[in-house]
Image: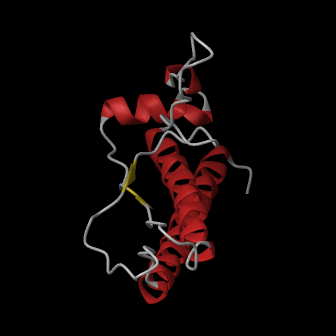
Amino acid sequence: MAITDIPILSMLRTRLQWHQERQRLLAENVSNSDTGGFRPRDLAPPKFDEQTRIAASSSATLVGLSRTEPGHIAGIGLSSSSSPFRTESAGKYEIRPSGNAVNLEDEMMKVASNQMDFQAATALYTRSLGLIKTALGKR
């Protein structure tokens, strides 16, 4: 059994990737706080059922959109970073006259929460690897 096949490590790795992608989206929201008509986005939390774990670990399951005619509009299926995570936009934002709906206080609270969760997942991943090293007698 390869170390990548251990379910807890696979789930922690998926969680770390999710936090990284969420940080990118939250930073995008903050950087566009003065852009007219911009709506903030966030990631839906990952579900750790069997299908999601397989989809997140296998990049071959991602399907991109293709243009068969030059007149077709390019699709926006996955973001430019090919993230396997689903984004969500809620319609309950306060919208300014410019059309912007970013609330900096909310976004910064999400950034701080995301950072703490990322640090917790990193600590769990590090401790799990330490347990495996101890079991192998490498410590």
Quadrant containing the C terminus is: bottom right
Q: Looking at this rendering, what residue extends furthest in the top direction?
A: 68
Q: How is the image coloured?
A: secondary structure
Q: Pick the residue in front: 126 or 46.
A: 46
Q: Eyeballing the image, is 91 above or below 107?
A: above
- Residue at image x 52%, y 32%? 57
Q: Nearer the viewer, residue 116 or 1?
A: 116
Q: Nearer the viewer, residue 54 or 123?
A: 54
Would residue 99 be found to the left or right of residue 108 on screen?
Answer: left
**Residue occupying image coordinates x 47% and y 79%:** 107
Query: Residue at horizontal 45%, vertical 67%?
Result: 40
Residue situated furthest left in the rendering = 92
Percent x, y of residue 38 = 49, 66
Please tell me whether residue 100 is drawn above or below residue 72 in the rendered image. below
Specify the farthest residue to the right: 138
> Which quadrant: the N terminus?
top right
Looking at the picture, how far across and down is residue 94, in whole percent? 32, 81
- The residue lying toward the viewer, choosing from 83 and 122, is 83
Residue 78 vertical position relative to residue 18 in the rendered view, above or below: above
Q: Position of residue 53 (x, y in %)?
A: 41, 35
Residue, x 49% and y 85% (percent of image)?
Answer: 104
**How many labels were placed on the picture?**
0
